[in-house]
Image: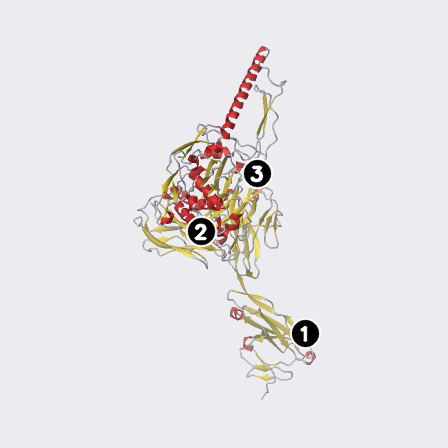
Amino acid sequence: MPVLLGPFVRCRSSATLLVFCIVFAGFTCTGAEHTATATLPAAFSDLLPHFLVEPEDEFIVKNKPVTLTCRSTPATQIYFKCNGEWVHQDDHLIERTVDPATALPVMQVTIDITRQQVEKIFGLDQYWCQCVAWSTTGTQKSQKAYIKIAYLRKNFEEEPQGKEVALDQEVLLRCHPPEGVPEAEVEWQRNEDIVNPVSDPNFFITADHNLVIKKARLADTGNYTCVAKNIVARRKSTSATVLVYVDGGWSEWSKWSACGADCSMWRSRECTQPSPGTGGKDCQGLDFQSLNCTSEQCPQTVSGAEDVALYVGMVAVALCLTLLLIVVVLVYRRKKEGLDADVADSSILTTGFQPMGIKPSKPENSHLLTIQPDLTTTTTSYQGTLRSRHDTTGKFSMTNGPLLDPLPNGSHTLHNGKLNSDPAEFVSRLSTQTYFKTLPRDVANTSYGTFNFLGGRLTIPSTGISLLIPPEAIPRGKIYEIYLTVQRKEDLRLPLAGCQTLLSPVVSCGPPGVVLSRPVILSMDHCSDACLDNWAIRLKKQNYEGAWEDVLLMGEELVSEPYYCQLETETCRLFSEQLGTLALVGESLHMGAAKRLRLVLFSDAYCSTLEYNIRVYCMDDTQDVFKEVMQMERQLGGRLIDEPHVLLFKDSYHNLRLSIHDMPQAHWRSKLLAGYQEIPFYHIWNGSQRYLHCTFTLERLSLSTCELTCQLCVWQVEGEGQSFSLDFNIAKDTRAVDTEFLLMDSNATALAGPSAFQIPYLIRQKICSSLDAPCPNGADWRMLAQRLKLERHMSFFASKVSPTSVILDLWEAQHFHSGNINQLATVMADIGKQEAMIFLVSDGEC
C-alpha cells in the first residue's frame, strides 16, 4: 500500500476519471485505470521551475467571474495563493503537457475569481493572487495579479458649461469624468461628431481631459459633449453650447463731401468690416461726422450790402440772447438761495401726514403722540427743484459726470409723492449716453425718478426689488435722475466656476459714479438657505469695462468699505455708497448647502384635444423669476393649477426627478415612456437657465373626460422631495393666469420726498438728535438696535456719523409696506425717549 508523503493534487484524465497522485520524487501511485507520473527525468531533476505564463491584473465586469492562469516548466505541482491564503485544491483546474522542443513537462493551472470573493475584503485591502510552482529542486513564486470590480458612476464631477465667445478668442471647456475603475477614457464630440485634434490642430485636449479651442471660428459654434467610457459603460455629459459671435468693425471713413449750401461738409463709415453677427456688439463710435467749411470753400450766396445786413442782424440776436441768459441766471441764483428756507417749511417735511392723538392703555404714556401716514393726499405745491410743471416731456442732457443740469425755476408740483413720466422715453433717452448703451430696454422691469436731498424710493413691482434713497443721501443743491432695473440673466455673461451659483437677481441702479453723502439701501430677494455656515456668499459688481469684481464677502464685511449687507431669510439688504450693477454669488462650503427652488404647476387654460399638458417649473425662489414665468404663462394662455411649493436643493451632485402617479387608468394615461423625468444637477445649480421646466403629456381616453386626479412628485435623488395632490376639472376653470399677482404690488414705482417714508422728516430728526449722543445707561441708538434685533451690525452703525439715522433707514427698507409707526413709538417709549416722537403742528406750519 503506498504511503502519502506530500500534498496531493486533483487530476483530470481524458475519461474524466479522477485519480489521486502522491507527488514526490521517485514515488507513483496508481488509480483504477490510469497512472499519473510526477517523477521528473533525471536530466531535469536539478532545474528550478520557471513560469511560461503568469497571472495578470483583471477587472470583474458586473457579475462575470474572471479566470487566472499560471503555466510553469518543469513543475511537479502548482498552487494559487490569494490574499495570503491558499486556494482550495478543488478550485484548481490542472492540465499537463510536454514541451516538444525540450521534452520538459509543462503544467498549467487555472482558477476562477468571483465578485463575491472580492467584495468580502472590500475596504480592507486590494484583492490579489499569485501562483507557487514546485520542482524537486525548489519553488518559484509568480507576480501578483490584482483583481478589481469595474464600475463607472453616472454623474460627471464637472460638466462643460456653455459659453459665448468673440471670434479668435480662446475657449476652455472643462470636463471631469465620473469616477470609475478602470479610469475612464475621455473623448469630445461636437454636434455628435468626434473632435479629433490630429485632423484639426485648432483643438487641443489637455491631460486632465479639458478641451481647448485655440482660436474660436464661426464654424466652431455648436453643442459640445464630453464622453467618458471604460469596459463597463459609456457616459455622456450634458451638452454645452458654444456660440462664437462677431463684434462689428468700422469701415474706413469715406472722403469728405463737397461743401454744401449750409457751409458744411460730411463723411461717413459703415459697420460692415465685419458686420456684427450671432449676437455680437454693434460698432462703437460715430458713423457720421460733419465740419464747417473754410470761407474760401463756402458757396457765395450773398454779397455786398446784403452781407453787412446779415452780420449786423446776427450780432443783434447774439446780444439779446446774452442779456436774456444773464437775467435767467440771476433769477435762478436768487431762487436757489431761498431753497433751504423753503425746505424748513413743514408742509414739505410732513407731506401726507396728519397729527393724530392715540390714547394709550398706560397712563404714563398719555403724552405720547404718534403719526400715521396719509397716502391719500392729492396735491401739494411748493417752491423747490424736483420737476418743472411745464417741462414734463423736455429732454435733459447729461454732463461729463452723472449729475443733471439744474432744471428751470418756477412753481413745482408733487402729486402724492409720485413721479409720473413715460418710462420708454426715459430708457430711450438714458441709453443714448455712452455708458448706458448696454442698459436693457425692458420698460416693464425698470423704474426711475428725479430726487434731491429729501430722498425717495424706487420699486420694481412684484419683484421684491427696491432702492431706498434716505434723506440727505443726495447732497443739498444736487438733483439726480436715478434708475433701477433688473437684468435678465441671458443679457449678461456672469462668470461662475466650480460650486458657485447665482443666488439673486442681477440688479442695476445708477447712473454709476454719482456722489452720495450716505449709503442707499438696495433690497432684493435671494434663494440661499440663509445659513452662512454653509456658504461663502460674495457680492459681485460689474465695472466700467464689463468685468465682474468681488466687492464683499458676507460675514467678513469691513465698516470702512463702501458696501455692507444684512442677509435675512429671503431678502438681502445692501447698504451701498456706490451705484452700479450688482449680484449675489454663493459658493457652497460643503454638501449641506442648499438653494430654495420654487416649484410651480401650470396647465393649458383651454383643452379641445385628447392630449393635456402639465408644466412643472423648477426655478430659483425669487419674486422676479416668478413674475417672469407668470407673464410668460399668461402669454401662452396657461393657468396656475396649485399653490407653489418650496424645495431645498442641496449641493450633493444628485439630479432632480419628477414623476406622476395615481391617475385613473380607465380615463387617463401618461405618454411618458420612462418612470420619471430628470433634470441634471448642474443645470439647476449653475443657474444659467432662468426657469427650467418639464412637461408631462397626458392623454384622456375620451373627450368627455374632464376630471383629473393624480399625484405629482418632485424630489432630489437622496434628498428632499415635494408632492402635489391634484384634483380638478380641466373644463370648468378656463381662465388664464390670474392677473391679481401681477397687480398685487401696484404701488407707485417712484416716490420722492416725504411720501416715500413712514417716519416724517422732522420726527426723524428729533429721534436722531435724541439717540445719537451716547447715554451712560445705554438708552441711546444701541438700545434701539437691540430692540429692533439689529445688534449684529453694531460696529457698522457705530462707524457712521449718525448711527440712529442708518438704523431708521434699515427700518424704512424693511417695513415700507407692513411697517407700523405705532410699534416704533412703543420701542421709543421702552427706551425712555418718547419725547422724541412728540410732534406738534401749529396752524402756521400746516
Q: Mark 2 points at which residue?
A: 787
Mark 2 residue type = Arg
Q: In this view, does 574 lie to the left or right of 172?
A: left
Q: Mark 1 points at which residue?
A: 102
Q: Contact (CB < 8 A) between labels 1 and 3?
A: no
Instruction: Looking at this view, name the residue that lies furthest to the top.
Output: 305
Across and down, in percent, residue 574 comes to: 50, 46
Task: Tell me which label, 2 or 3, sits earlier in the chain.
Answer: 3
Whole-number angstrom distance, CA of label 1 to CA of label 3: 79 Å
Whole-number angstrom distance, CA of label 2 to CA of label 1: 100 Å
- Assign a secondary structure to mark 3: loop
Q: Mark 3 points at which residue?
A: 247
- Assign a secondary structure to mark 1: loop
Across and down, in percent, residue 70 comes to: 61, 72
Mark 1 residue type = Thr
Where residue 721 sits, quadrant-wise, is bottom left
Mark 3 residue type = Asp
Task: Tell me which label, 1 or 3, sits earlier in the chain.
Answer: 1
- Assign a secondary structure to mark 2: helix
**Viewer-nearest of discs 2 and 1:** 2
